[in-house]
Image (tube, rainbow, N blue to C red):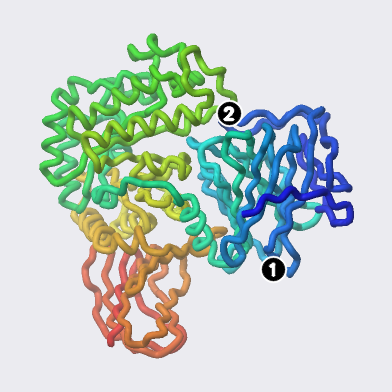
Amino acid sequence: MTPVTPEPDPTAQQPVPAWRPNDRTAIPSDGGTGTPGNAGLPEVPEGPEDLATPPPAAAAVVHRRLPTDLVHATGDPLTVHLTGFGDDGWQAAVTRVADGVVLVEVTATDAVTVRAEWRVPCAGAAAYWTPDTKAARWLPPSWIAPRTVSLALGAPVACLVGTDDRALCTAAAGETSAPVRVGAGVVEESGEFAFTVEQELTPDGPPMRVRIDLSGRHFAATLRAVTDWWAEGTEHPGVAPAARLPAYSTWYSLHQNVDTATVERQAVLAAAVGCGSVIVDDGWQTSDRTRGYGHCGDWEPNPEAFPDPAAHVTEVRRLGLAYLLWYALPFIGRHNDAWDRFKGLILREETHLDAAVLDPRHPEVRAYLIDRVSRAVEDWGMDGVKLDFIDRFAVAEPPPAPAGADHATVHEGVRRLLADLDARLRRTRPDVIVEHRQPYVSPGLWPYATMVRATDCPLSPAENRQRTVDCRLTAGPLAVHADMIMWHAAETPEGVAVHLVNALFSVPQISVDLAAQTPDQLATVRFWLGVFRRYADVLQLAALEPARPDLGYPLVRAHDDRTTVVARYAPLPVALPDRDDTDTPWTLLVANADGDPTVLLTATRPGRALALVQDCRGEILSETVLELVAGANPVTVPTGGLLTLTRED
């Protein structure tokens, strides 16, 4: 990579000016140094964490253009426009890393904030994909506030998806710890779609690195390439086998009403239906049952409910189940001894939760949290911990670092906390399981986690599907878990199966009272958890190709060389594997979560296949040889049922 300092070029055409609130970066007509625009408008609040406010209006604003070798679908070249706030001591370089993919790198010799912006024609666009759990898939306007991502919140990646599921542009930043502003949206003035990345640079800090992909591949393939890029030079300790097995969670089924006898009773039933672990959530640390987090922080077991945690864990593990315990890591509640000890070392108080968020920049805070959490593994013999609410560390305006702090920024304190905790846990249990949760999905957290769970969406199967698929697309080495799956007591077995199939490409967490289920409901759970376990390699590790993010992924496919699994959530046709080698056997599984039982299998050539149809309980409804024709082949698969198609040699 050869550094280049692009010079202003008055003859080059500038982008059509786009209005943004409080925009102090308007690109001047001469393409060089200009004065900020919209300086009189009020400040627009930015996202969370500790990204500094851009320089005041009097600071220098330097604009430069950086040509790339990328070409839009229209045939026009893509140019990256760079803006430096406060200084001109920075250089830029562009490197081609693959067909249709470049890496832009900006380094600084002085402290400066740099914004990179580029635009693509907004033609044939259907969706704007980000890992933000609160985002819609609609195309936002360019004037919307950018999202600030950091170690504890989000990930710096976005994709503009076309109507054919191909990426019109996928972009990602290489900074996965310090705050980065990521923006995008439709430029009303030109009909283009603009991408922006803004980052603070220092001479001794990391450069700005932005990966831009115009290769036109399936959007999931471009996101996989981003995760591969993030993973370069990153070591991950591996995923314990239990983290990829179905789990039983106490949260929706029991909430805070947990004790030794209740958990052990559910554990026996969970093992019988195919679960591989039990996750005991909030309630173990308090006798209070009013919810909230006022009783978090001391992390002592409720002696009435859990008089002997070590013996209890031993009993659950005897059943063949791993055991994980919940911690709301950042919180200290008002009703804990820790409140008086640490109330002067907090980032903010959350009065509606009756708790405060601790400041990880202080070594005493980190040492305390690490000691409290480590006891679960060291003293009680647990297999891992569920670390909740890490995203609460990402605050918009953190207070000055307290006296005695050994880190200036919150993200540095969070990283040190999680790294030191991971190191201590692995001294006792090298294959420790650590659960994180959306929205803290930064690749900077990969080394300190085993799995990541979709954020809470109780009784919302479609939302669980979308969130698990989103997470799968950028989770890297981590196992992806669905949010806890629950259903009403009167739910039909078919409805139970629909809940499970919506989480098919993740690890399901069951959270109902298993003792209260009907035989048919239990049979459904047992059958589908068996499918999750039997095809775990394909469902969790093989190439994932979700369709139509703008419609919530109505059809999702995962495949390796021999097996393809398709989940159908709408009355859509399912394409048979199109193999060039006609002698290669293949297996196709079609899980039908739609109300229409007629599944159309589309084939490119005639053939024969053995078709096994099972209902939601796994009972065999038919087993026949299909004479496939080129075109549509209807097969009846009931709602919640499974078709297994095996090609005959």
Q: How many other residues sit within 10 Å of disc 2, few (<14), some (14-19) or many (≥20)?
A: many
Residue positioned 14% across, 41% down in the render: 317
Left or right of 195, for residue 275 = left
Q: As drawn, is 227 to the left or to the right of 90?
A: left
Across and down, in percent, residue 338 comes to: 35, 14
Reading the image, the residue beneath label 2 is 50
Snapshot quadrant of residue 538: bottom left
Q: Where does label 1 land, which residue?
A: 73
As displayed, is residue 74 above or below residue 480?
A: below
Relative vertical location of residue 291 with respect to residue 557 in this rendering, above or below:
above
Name the foreground residue: 222 vs 283: 222
Residue drawn 79% across the image and 30% down it = 59
Mark 2: which amino acid?
Asp
- For the N terminus, the image quarter is bottom right
Quarter of the image where the C terminus is located: bottom left
Name the residue located 69 percent from the left edge and 68 percent from the top edge: 73
Residue 584 is drawn in which quadrant?
A: bottom left
Question: Which of 509/66 is in front?
Answer: 66
In the displayed structure, 341 sits above or below 46; it is above
Q: Give whichever of discs 1 and 2 has the lower sequence position.
A: 2
Picture coordinates of residue 484 (x, y %)? Answer: 34, 44
Figure check: 353 above or below 191: above
In the image, 600 versus 125, the foreground residue is: 125
Task: Give the camera-side residue of 313 and 638.
Answer: 313
Circle 2 sits in a helix, a strand or a loop, which is it? Answer: loop
- The percent position of residue 95, horizontal first and vertical second, equals 62, 57
Amino acid on which disc 1 is placed: Ala
